[in-house]
Amino acid sequence: MRVRCVALKPNAEQVSKLRSYYEQGSTDYDLVLGCHYLVLGIGRRQGITWVELPTPGGWILTVPLFLFEITDARASRYWVIEDVEINDALWFGPALLFDRTLNARLADGEPAAVERYQRVLDLLNAESEQIPLSRTE
């Protein structure tokens, strides 16, 4: 699955839906308008659909889907379902990424976490035939 960024910030209606998940003036998703992103996973939590994206810094960014248009709606064959009781969430993504400590371990540069993450990125990028990850229009 791939998406293209169509907004850098949520509009007023979207901010009201995000509630505590968005703080005006301090939440920055660090997106590039018009950039195409590979979607690592997608999920729904408390009525909002979120996508997980790889960042240039080497970790996973979770962003509301309404900031994007879907350019390739194909789900990855590597995605499985994770039903999370906390926050009434449902996620689809690679099982290798269903580790709540993964982002912290990636930020710390832990070799096993970085290797796992890179393996997932390689699989998903190889599977996707559409637009290269960093291309903008």
Image (spheres, grey):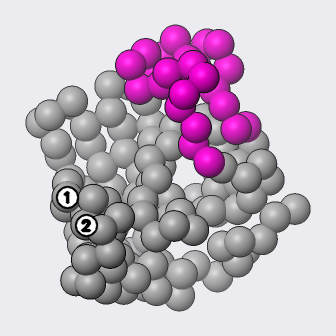
Image position of 48 (left or right of 103): right
Magenta run includes residue 37: no
Q: Quadrant of residue 93?
A: bottom left
**Residue at point 31% right, 60% down?**
103
Q: Quadrant of the C terminus?
A: bottom right
Q: Are marks 1 and 2 in contact (CB under 8 Å)?
A: yes
Residue drawn at x 25%, y 37% as measured from the top left: 89
**Left or right: 55 with respect to 76?**
right
Q: Is residue 88 above or below residue 125?
A: above
Which element type, helix, strand or loop, lies under badge 2? helix
Q: Which residue is more in the foreground, 123 or 107?
A: 107
Q: Which residue is mark 1?
A: 101
Left or right placement of residue 100 versus residue 45 in this view:
left
Q: Secondary structure at mark 1?
A: loop
What segment carries the magenta color? 7-30
Residue 100 placement: quadrant: bottom left
Q: Which image quadrant: the N terminus?
A: bottom right
Amino acid carrying label 2: it is Arg
Vertical placement of residue 49 versus 59, above or below: above
- Alpha-carbon distance for marks 1 and 2? 6 Å
Residue 19 placed where, x, y %? Answer: 43, 16
Q: Is residue 26 magenta?
A: yes
Residue drawn 37% across and 45% down? Answer: 43
Exactly how many numbered labels are in the figure? 2
Q: Is residue 1 left or right of residue 100?
A: right
User: Residue 43 versus residue 15: which sits nearer the camera?
Assistant: 15
Label disc, if present, on residue 105 of the rendered structure: 2
Label 1, residues with CA under 10 Å away: few <14, some 14-19, many ≥20: few
